[in-house]
Image: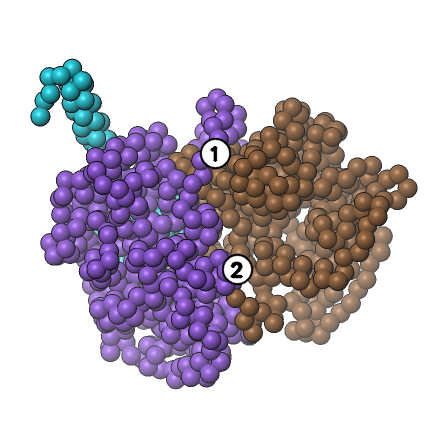
Chain colours: A brown, B cyan, C purple
């Protein structure tokens, strides 16, 4: 129901679900759909990035703004997130060799210099891990109260011989996730709500372009779709992939890798780990004959030790994600809006 | 009737217990639980308050209850099957 | 089984290390499901309708995918047991009005997005209202201790949750802590459903956690009056299946009894200490539940002794200004009440799937993760998730 309130953009529009996609379609795409005669992948595809033909190769571009709060938390900070997020978006398109990054910051008046330096160190360290460099940036300061601490924007560019869309799945393909689910979102939620959870919850944020490179090398052509399950969790990522590809997906709950602390925290808060953001993981759609090779390549890499086969694509129930719970079956929905702890 | 979660008491400090839920610890208040609670006990937590001390023996008792229910259901099944068999053989038991 | 790295695999959604493990055993679950199917068949009429009155039961059923495994001849209706769903529109409005008047509100996450006449608490928050999500009433009290201004705890939930609020009230909260009580009491609404002429309900599954407080004895008068069986059940998959099996047996045998299938937490008398605190602080009054007519003794309000922290008595809650901007009667067209009473299905509602969808809900049944409409919207109706048979043991993935 569109009420007068929808004349304002509220938090639910940033949460990665249906509301956000509708907003993008209605406001940003309307009238802006350019022609792509070269087969370029542009805004209308709403993929992780854009891919433009340049000569015989692809130039892949992506941009992200980072507004996470708290700024520092177990496992990372906004700087590490900024680099990882952008490098991973490029990687999800198949572009694992980063050409360059830009980084613009908007800082609130009064922000501690020491914190800024700490963030810069994180950015540098993450760049080293990814083999990337920040080549350009911008710095602005806004008045106290005009923004919440700090906002980062990063843009990444890479050249690539191939592009892997998020829409290439077909019935029979199998789904692999590169590691444990829900680590980042649970760690942030515990911090943000001051939930006094005395547990080892750490964000998983990391650049995974090296991991993806290894997987792509192990099975060229057999990885047909990729996405990183960030906001909205694995549920959102799979919904997009299934919808765009025209398949249904069946997941095996027993096969989903989840650490014990994340499992416990999600039971306590009544939150589904499938809805929780990840910042160092990918879900890959793989042709069945290549699945063992891809799993082996992932597990051989330090960031892919917990890689697991979690589901398969079917021709029925297009766009739906069905979870086999071991007791029965249910549909996996996308979370709407911000995740909130539940008491009932 | 909402999200009641069982956990194991690690420590008790006056009216507050430190409770372990599958490796995650939380503070749970003991203002409404109707029995004294000690480290090692299991409690049922609801919105940060322990509402019941769960006696360990009860868990086994409940499982036994379910087994009994199943056994009875199977036995009735067998009776039904026996009736069907008898009818088929024409000896008809009522 | 784990691989030592702390990653849990093998058991569906099962945390390690607790005896509760046994209540998620899929083999026993399958056995119970089969037994249930046989008993339902033996009842000889279809469908057999039973009702549960607990949001967490619905949540567990949905989460474990149990409905897809229940026999077709058994209709497990979700009754008015979701506290979010039955919190009446004016009650939400009270919280919203206070937030817009600049008062700090603390609330459980479940209530944040429930629509009032004009807006939800989340909307009030977007407009600058200070609404904070808490996990426990104790957190709200802490909040009040740490600041100088009034903090109003918007108290929602059934009697199990009201017990916690009562405990907080009795423990000398600071003078700036107030309670806006929208708590509800479940047993009276079972009477209403049982008395509805259209009702087809043949038995009730009662909520294990509420019964932990009230005891199962509280259902004896109900059973005697209406000659309908009541089974108290817990929330793990085995608890629910065993509870339904027992209920089906009682229906088959025409036995009007109360059966306690949750003995590890529920006794006949319940938790007396919690009851004393509950009734010292609250008194039951009649009131309207969202979409359902008047429920005698269904609402819990603070007794006069606690007037000093009763938000309704200490604040001038200006609802008229709110209602001046009320949009036309979408809210009137909402039939959540009939759906919660099990009389209508979501597909009978003209708004379902059109004006009323999960990201833009009209009625609370679509807001709550347990609401019938939300669940139907997810499943496209009653869940039917069978797929064409696959080879081998039917497992999705090799292990």
Nearer to us in this view, C190 or A278: C190
Left or right of A275 on screen, residue C232 = left
Q: Position of residue C56 (x, y in %)?
A: 35, 51
Left or right of B68 on screen, residue B49 = right
Q: Position of residue C140 (x, y in %)?
A: 41, 67
Q: Which callout, 1 or 2, points to the residue nearer the camera?
A: 1
Q: Is residue A36 visible?
A: yes
Label 1 packing within 10 angstroms: few (<14), some (14-19), many (20+): few
Residue found farthest to the top: B89
Instruction: Determine which residue is flagged by label 1.
Output: C387
The mark found on residue C75 in the picture is none
Which quarter of the figure has residue A165?
A: top right
When the figure is inspected, residue A138 is found, relative to residue C232, above or below; the finding is below
Q: Position of residue C145 (x, y in %)?
A: 42, 71
Which quarter of the figure has residue A161?
A: top right
Nearer to us in this view, A277 or A14: A14
State which chain disc 2 sits on: C
Instruction: Determine which residue is flagged by label 2.
Output: C359
* Viewport quadrant of the C terminus of chain A: bottom left
Mark 1: secondary structure:
loop
Q: CB of mark 1 within 8 Å of CB of mark 2?
A: no
């Amino acid at each position: 129901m569109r009420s007068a309130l929808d004349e304002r953009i509220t938090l639910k529009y940033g949460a990665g679900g249906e509301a956000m996609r509708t907003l993008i379609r209605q406001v940003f795409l309307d009238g802006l759909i350019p022609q792509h005669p070269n087969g370029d992948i542009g805004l209308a595809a709403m993929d992780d990035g854009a891919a433009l033909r340049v000569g015989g190769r692809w130039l892949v571009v992506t941009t992200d703004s980072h507004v996470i709060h708290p700024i520092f938390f177990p496992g990372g900070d906004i700087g590490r997130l900024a680099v990882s997020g952008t490098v991973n978006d490029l990687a999800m398109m198949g572009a694992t060799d980063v050409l360059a990054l830009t980084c613009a910051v908007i800082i609130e008046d009064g922000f501690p210099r020491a914190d800024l330096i700490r963030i810069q160190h994180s950015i540098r360290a993450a760049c080293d891990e990814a083999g990337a460099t920040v080549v350009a940036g911008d710095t602005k300061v806004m008045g106290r109260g005009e923004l919440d601490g700090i906002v980062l924007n990063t843009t990444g560019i890479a050249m690539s011989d191939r592009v892997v869309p998020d829409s290439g799945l077909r019935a029979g393909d199998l789904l692999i996730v590169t590691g444990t689910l829900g680590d980042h979102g649970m760690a942030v939620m515990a911090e943000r709500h001051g939930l006094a959870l005395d547990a080892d919850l750490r964000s998983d944020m990391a650049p995974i372009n090296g991991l993806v490179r290894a997987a792509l090398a192990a099975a060229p052509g057999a990885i047909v779709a990729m996405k990183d399950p960030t906001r909205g969790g694995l549920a959102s990522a799979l919904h997009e992939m299934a919808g765009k590809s025209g398949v249904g997906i069946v997941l095996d709950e027993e096969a989903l890798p989840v650490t014990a602390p994340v499992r416990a925290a999600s039971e306590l808060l009544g939150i589904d780990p499938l809805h929780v953001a990840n910042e160092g993981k990918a879900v890959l759609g793989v042709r069945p004959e290549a699945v063992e090779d891809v799993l082996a390549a992932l597990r051989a890499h330090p960031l892919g030790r917990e890689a697991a086969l979690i589901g398969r694509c079917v021709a029925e129930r297009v766009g739906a994600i069905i979870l086999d719970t071991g007791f029965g079956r249910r549909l996996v929905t996308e979370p709407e809006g911000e995740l909130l702890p539940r008491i009932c | 009737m909402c999200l009641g979660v069982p956990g194991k008491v690690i420590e008790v400090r006056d009216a507050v217990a430190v409770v372990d839920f599958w490796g995650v610890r939380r503070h749970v208040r003991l203002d409404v639980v109707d029995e004294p609670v000690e480290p090692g006990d299991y409690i049922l937590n609801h919105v940060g308050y322990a509402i019941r001390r769960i006696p360990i023996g009860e868990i086994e008792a409940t499982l036994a209850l379910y087994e009994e229910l199943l056994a009875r259901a199977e036995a009735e099944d067998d009776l039904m099957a026996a009736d069907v068999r008898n009818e088929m053989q024409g000896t008809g038991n009522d | 089984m784990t691989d030592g790295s702390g990653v849990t695999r093998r058991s569906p959604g099962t945390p390690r290390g607790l005896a509760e493990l046994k209540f998620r055993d899929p083999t026993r679950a399958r056995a119970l499901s089969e037994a249930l199917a046989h008993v339902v068949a033996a009842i000889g009429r279809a469908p057999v309708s039973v009702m549960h009155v607990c949001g967490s039961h619905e949540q567990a059923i949905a989460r474990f995918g149990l409905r897809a495994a229940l026999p077709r001849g058994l209709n497990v209706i979700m009754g008015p047991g979701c506290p979010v769903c039955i919190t009446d529109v004016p009650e939400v409005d009270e919280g919203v009005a206070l937030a817009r008047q600049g008062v700090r509100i603390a609330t459980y996450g479940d209530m944040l997005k429930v629509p009032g006449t004009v807006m939800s608490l989340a909307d009030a928050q977007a407009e600058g209202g200070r609404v904070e999500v808490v996990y426990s009433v104790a957190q709200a009290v802490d909040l009040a201790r740490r600041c100088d201004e009034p903090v109003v705890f918007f108290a929602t939930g059934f009697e199990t949750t009201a017990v916690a609020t009562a405990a907080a009230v009795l423990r000398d909260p600071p003078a700036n802590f107030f309670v806006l009580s929208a708590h509800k009491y479940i047993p009276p609404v079972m009477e209403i459903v049982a008395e509805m002429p259209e009702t087809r309900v043949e038995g009730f599954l009662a909520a294990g956690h509420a019964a932990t407080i009230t005891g199962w004895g509280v259902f004896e008068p109900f059973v005697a009056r209406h000659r309908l069986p009541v089974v108290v059940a817990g929330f793990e998959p085995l608890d629910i299946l065993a509870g339904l099996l027992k209920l089906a047996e009682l229906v088959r045998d025409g036995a009007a009894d109360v059966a306690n299938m949750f003995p590890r937490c529920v006794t006949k008398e319940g938790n007396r200490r919690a009851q004393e605190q509950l009734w010292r602080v609250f008194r039951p009054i009649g009131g309207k539940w969202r979409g359902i007519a008047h429920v005698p003794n269904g609402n819990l309000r603070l007794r006069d002794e606690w007037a000093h922290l009763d938000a309704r008595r200490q604040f001038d809650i200006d609802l008229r200004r709110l209602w001046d901007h009320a949009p036309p009667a979408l809210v009137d067209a909402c039939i959540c009440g009939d759906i919660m009473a099990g009389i209508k299905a979501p597909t009978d509602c003209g708004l379902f799937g059109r004006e009323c969808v999960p990201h833009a809900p009209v009625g609370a049944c679509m807001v709550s993760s347990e609401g019938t409409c939300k669940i139907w919207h997810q499943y496209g109706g009653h869940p039917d998730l069978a797929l064409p048979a696959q080879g081998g043991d039917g497992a999705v993935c090799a292990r």
